[in-house]
Image (tube, rainbow, N blue to C red):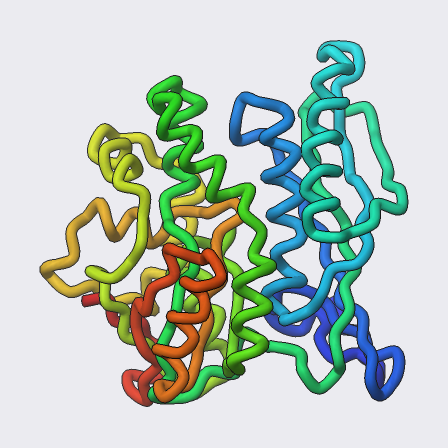
Amino acid sequence: MPLISHPNLIVGIERSEDAGVYKLTEKLAIIQTLDFFTPIVDDPYDFGQIAATNSLSDVYAKGGIPITAMNIVCFPIKKMDINILREILRGGLDKMREASVVLVGGHSVDDNELKYGLSVTGLIHPKKVIMNNGAKPGDKLILTKKLGTGIISTGIKASEANKNTIKKVTQSMTTLNKAASEVMMSVGIHACTDVTGFGFLGHAAEMLTDTDNGMVIDSSMIPFFHEAKVLVDNGFLPGGLSRNRDFRKGMIDFGQDVPQYLRDILFDPQTSGGLLMAVAKTKATRLIDALHKAGVSNAAIVGEVVEKPKGKIIVR
């Protein structure tokens, strides 16, 4: 498909960025993104909050401020109680209010499968846009949320996740990346992406696209839900996990000491995951301290960017 170019287009579909960015003036650009999906938890209000948080995340990953949103709804009106849809929309709206985002409309269709999400518009200075491939050798990699939401969502569908586990994973997926984004912009970073459907290693691999860099990941520092380990050990793996692994396996070298359950968690497709940032080594400690102070308690240094091997991710 031929790509569309324009002098004001800062980020388009030419590579795997989190959102599109279009310059309006020399001091103002808009960020545009869209995301929606099927329910991953049983509670409709929680699902609405999760879907909205996930949709807003791409703007935060670019370093921007979301300002408006539009609902995207697919709903089986003849098969499902309309009150379910009301609760989903209420959850999404409450999360938008928390983010100081204005709902300006949306679109709904009658569909056999329930889906919900948002189209989001944000603002940023054209020269402050954070790309996902700007990391430099020596940079430290920081992850801001625990991994394992996809595995636990699979466990929820199979009634294998208890109420406490569901509560913990829902709290993570409904936590905005707003604070993390504000802190990273105040400290200054080189690159960022949000960790979602392609899993931690899939999105880390995207950060290496069109660069001469590699990465080393310290698996012992990865924050993850320990309930996900139990589910993996019992065979509860989402289908997307295998697809993520098959697509990126040529780029990943695992050390012998990295356990299988953690390898799976690193490929687990996340919903409303955290931010993965590349920051200069001299700023890494300051960034971690600032994130923790801002309430991003699970933020951790999980690896570094290296010169060699080019295009490879070594997990040790």
The residue at the point 81 percent across, 24 percent down is: 110
Left or right: where does residue 108 sit relative to residue 229?
A: right
Q: Assign the C terminus to one quadrant of the image.
A: bottom left
Total numbered circles: 0
Residue 210 on image: x %, y %: 51, 82
Residues 165 and 262: in front is 165
- Residue at 34% x, 64% y is 300
**The N terminus sits in image quarter:** bottom right
Residue at the limit of the structure toward the left, as seen here = 257
Q: Is residue 307 left or right of residue 244?
A: left
Residue 54 location, x and y as percent? Answer: 60, 48
Query: Is residue 197 at all visible to an observer of this figure?
Result: no
Q: Residue at 84% across / 45% down in the picture?
A: 103
**Compared with residue 205, is residue 108 higher up or lower down, i.e. above or below?**
above
The residue drawn where x is 32% and y is 69% is 301
Specify whether residue 153 is in view. yes
Question: In the depicted view, which residue is nearer to us: 197 or 102?
Answer: 102
Is 238 displayed left or right of 17 in the figure?
left
Tell me if residue 199 comes above or below residue 5 in the rendering. above
